[in-house]
Image (cartoon, rainbow, N blue to C red):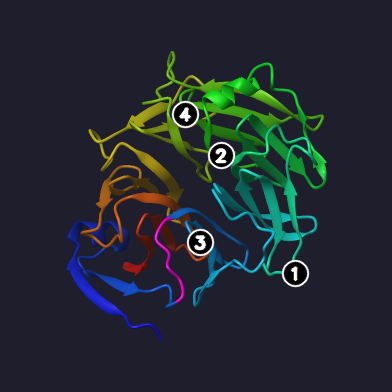
């Protein structure tokens, strides 16, 4: 058993928003274990058994609710400069995508030294580049792979053809790198966050190709606070949230040119640099910034910082697990928020 120290702090506004009373919030401190030295948590995904998988500076770690495990037994897994991870259910089983400079690696769960790792690169697949920046799971075994030269997609064992390269040429992605990917609610469309040209959009067409749609950028009636986009979240109701270095944009409905709203520090955000976004089971939107979290319930905003319970204000990733627990990766460990209790792992 790990020793726990409990710090009680008054959070009148916070508790009123999250669980409807003026109770006190607990902050529980725990460690990862004696053998694990983990600090920076860059990316997170949750599998169908509710196991949390994190990308850290030490590699991939998993947490089943009881034990943290560094997944370092399989020597075929990429180890250096890994950018992203994503759980995906394929026709051949439960797997994890790993984005790396050597390609997109796909490994079966549970990860052990005997499991084969299929690493797709330009030498053995139609990938536009082996330098993979981000990955996202669509529907029906469709996976999206963002590289330094563009977006690729594989469905089962079939790679989709490229029908968007005239609209979005490879040079565009080299000059304006991909930072994040998110799929539409049906999984067949992809939102591509970039540095410098806003959000690009592609979709799976009727002939198993990837076609381009209009982009979201700072032009005309589209209200993007910045063309430097670092996070995307598509809510279950289809609402699109885009986090930038100058605030967050919200788009609702299917009219590209209408229904845009911008939020920044002037009207709710604690900090304008939005690095992560997630929607909880109550529909509240969690925005992870460089200086804490802002939670939006549709009308009211609540700020969460280290004072309220975070292990660090520099939030790098956020997810919601199968039980509705919020998991927050930072540059100084992990915070989880469950039923009014903060638990910090570091």
Look at 80% across and 33% down and name the residue there.
208
Query: Residue at label 3?
Result: 321
Q: Are marks 2 and 1 in contact (CB under 8 Å)?
A: no
Answer few, some or many: residues within 10 Å of disc 3's Cα (few below 14, many 20 plus, some between 14 and 19). some
Q: Earlier in the sequence, mark 4 or mark 2?
A: 2
Query: Residue at label 1?
Result: 114
Is residue 255 visible from the viewing direction of this image?
A: no
Q: Picture coordinates of residue 172 (x, y %)?
A: 58, 21
Q: Earlier in the sequence, mark 1 or mark 3?
A: 1
Look at 39% across and 61% down and name the residue there.
39
Determine which quarter of the picture holds residue 189: top right
As measured in the structure, the alpha-carbon distance from the residue carrying label 4 to the one carrying label 2 is 13 Å
Q: Are marks 1 and 3 in contact (CB under 8 Å)?
A: no
Look at 43% across and 76% down and name the residue there.
33
Q: Earlier in the sequence, mark 2 or mark 1?
A: 1
Query: Residue at label 2?
Result: 181
Q: Which label sits in the foreground, 2 or 1?
A: 1
- Magenta span of residues: 35-40
Q: Are marks 4 and 3 in contact (CB under 8 Å)?
A: no
Of helix, strand and loop, which one carries label 4? Answer: loop
Q: Earlier in the sequence, mark 2 or mark 3?
A: 2
Q: Is residue 39 magenta?
A: yes
């Amino acid at each position: 058993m790990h020793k726990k120290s409990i710090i009680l702090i008054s959070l009148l506004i916070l508790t009123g928003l999250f669980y409807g009373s003026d109770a006190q919030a607990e902050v529980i401190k725990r460690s990862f274990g004696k053998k694990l030295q983990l600090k920076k948590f860059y990316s997170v995904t949750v599998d169908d058994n509710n196991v949390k998988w994190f990308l850290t500076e030490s590699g991939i770690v998993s947490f089943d609710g009881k034990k943290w495990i560094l997944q370092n037994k399989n020597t075929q897994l990429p180890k250096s400069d890994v950018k992203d991870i994503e759980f995906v259910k394929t026709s051949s089983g439960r797997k994890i995508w790993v984005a790396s400079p050597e390609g997109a690696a796909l490994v079966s769960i549970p990860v052990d030294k005997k499991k084969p790792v299929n690493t797709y690169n330009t030498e053995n697949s139609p990938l536009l580049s082996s330098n993979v920046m981000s990955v996202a799971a669509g529907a029906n075994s469709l996976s999206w792979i963002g590289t330094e030269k563009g977006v690729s997609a594989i469905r089962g064992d079939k790679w989709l053809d490229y029908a968007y390269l005239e609209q979005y040429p490879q040079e565009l992605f080299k000059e304006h790198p991909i930072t994040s990917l998110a799929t539409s609610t049906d999984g067949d469309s992809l939102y591509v966050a970039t540095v410098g040209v806003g959000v690009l959009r592609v979709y799976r067409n009727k002939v198993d190709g990837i076609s381009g749609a209009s982009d979201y950028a700072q032009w005309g009636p589209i209200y993007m606070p910045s063309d430097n986009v670092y996070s995307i979240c598509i809510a279950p109701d289809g609402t699109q949230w885009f986090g930038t270095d100058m605030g967050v944009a919200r788009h609702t409905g299917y009219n590209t040119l209408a229904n845009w709203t911008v939020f920044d520090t002037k009207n709710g955000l604690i900090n304008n640099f939005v690095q992560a976004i997630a929607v909880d089971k109550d529909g509240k939107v969690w925005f992870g910034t460089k200086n804490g979290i802002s939670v939006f319930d549709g009308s009211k905003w609540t700020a969460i910082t280290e004072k309220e319970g975070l292990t660090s204000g520099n939030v790098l990733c956020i997810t919601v697990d199968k039980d509705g627990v919020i998991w927050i990766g930072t540059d100084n460990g992990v915070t989880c928020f469950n039923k009014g209790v903060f638990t910090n792992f570091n």
